[in-house]
Amino acid sequence: MGLKLGKVAKQLLGSVAPTVARAIGGPFGGLAASVLESAFGTDDTTAIEKQLATGNPEALLKLKQAEQDMLVRMRELDIREDQLYIEDTKDARLLAREQGTTPQLILTALFLAIYAALLWIFFTMEFELNDWQRGQVGILIGVVTAAVGQVINFWFGTSKGSKDKQSLMAISANNH
């Protein structure tokens, strides 16, 4: 059973019921949908979404109940929380293994080349820009510079903290 929620509902779900949110799009999505439907008393996605969109305290309590029910059901089924993360990310790793990384390499090289060219043009060429244009170019460079970090994180990981977390999850998985 696929539960499709809008952006606002997903954000609220992620902050109030993170375990349910992680499970909703993966192999445990049916379980997550089941606890949400039980907590809200309906299997009508639109009705659930409307209740979440209002942000009223009753809807938040229902989300908290769904989170607690999800944790209980996971314990009953012997599903560990780290399995949600592993199941969610393994398909992406499998896809990269099957398809190769050539498209990502090409896009990365193209993005970085355009970024370098943009910086070179902006800092070495002389342009007659008014204040508004200068501000717009500054915003453009700022946005693209922020994206460089995401490109690098794709290839090398997001942080030492993430690597440490993955190591601890692997140790935990081996101990169970």
Image (spheres, grey):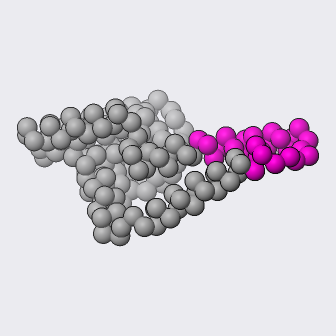
Q: Position of residue 99 (x, y in %)?
A: 35, 70
The residue closer to the viewer here, 160 or 81, is 160
Residue placed furthest toward the front: 124
Q: Position of residue 88 (x, y in %)?
A: 30, 52
- Say which residue appears at 64% left-offset and 50% top-offset: 116
The residue closer to the viewer here, 120 or 74, is 120
Q: Give the answer, above or below, for where 32 lies relative to 56.
A: below
**139 relative position to 50: left or right:** right
Residue placed furthest toward the bottom: 99
- 138 part of magenta stretch: yes
**107 relative position to 85: left or right:** right
Residue 116 in sight in this render: yes
Give the number of callouts: 0
The quarter in which the N terminus is drawn is: bottom left
The quarter in which the C terminus is drawn is: top left
Secondary structure mostly seen in the magenta stretch: helix
- Say which residue appears at 30% left-offset and 69% top-offset: 98
Region rendered in magenta: 121-146
Residue placed furthest toward the left: 175
- Say which residue appears at 31% left-offset and 58% top-offset: 93
Residue 76, by quadrant, is top left
Q: Position of residue 103 (x, y in %)?
A: 46, 67
The residue closer to the viewer here, 5 or 131, is 131
Q: Position of residue 117 (x, y in %)?
A: 68, 54
